[in-house]
Amino acid sequence: MKKTSAFPFESTLEVRDACLCLHLQRAARKVARIFDDAFRPLGITNGQFSLLISLNRPEPPVMGDVAALLALDRTTLTANLKPLERRGLVVVSPDPNDRRSRRLALTAEGEELMNRAYPIWRETHALIDKMIADPDRLRTDLLALS
């Protein structure tokens, strides 16, 4: 049964073929699945890896800085921190200079997990780079968009 529509099917094809948002979302989901599979033996997701690695700084960062780096709102960051706190990988503590602010730090267990996760990230990242014609150009273009 053929459906008739006032909206042209050609427009659907145009979006399918040309929409940067759609193509970026699809690529991001594919890359996320690859990293999720790689990190699964450690019991973390690609998003948790990104969050944990973002805490590896000389001084524990404040939540706002981590949220900005990861392009998350503070509520989402707080929700993403909870399972990592429960596992003892991260500690959230008041900022000694501003009690309203919170500082985030890796625990010894979190650092040990990052020592195990980083080689997996490097290996997986190298595989993904090989799937892309010009990975450095892609990184440059993505940074320009963000």
Image (spheres, rainbow, N blue to C red):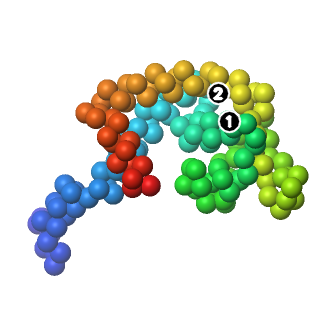
Viewer-proximal residue among 51 and 87:
51
Q: Amino acid under label 1? A: Asn
Mark 1 secondary-structure assignment: loop
Image position, residue 127 (x, y; %):
37, 25
Side (left or right) of 71 relative to 100: left
Residue 48 visible in rendering: no
In the image: residue 18, left or right of residue 39: left
> Which residue sits at x=26%, y=58%?
19
Give the mark count.
2
Q: Position of residue 117 (x, y in %)?
A: 59, 25
Crowding near the residue tagged with mark 2, few <14, some 14–19, many ≥20 C-alpha atoms within 10 Å: many
Q: At label 2, which amino acid type do we have?
A: Met
Residue 48, horizontal then vertical, whole percent: 60, 39
Q: Which residue is mark 1?
A: 56
Residue assigned mark 2: 114
Nearer the observer: mark 1 or 2; the answer is 1
Q: Earlier in the sequence, mark 1 or mark 2?
A: 1
Look at the numbered discs 1 and 2 and tell me whether their residues touch, using CB distance below 8 Å. yes
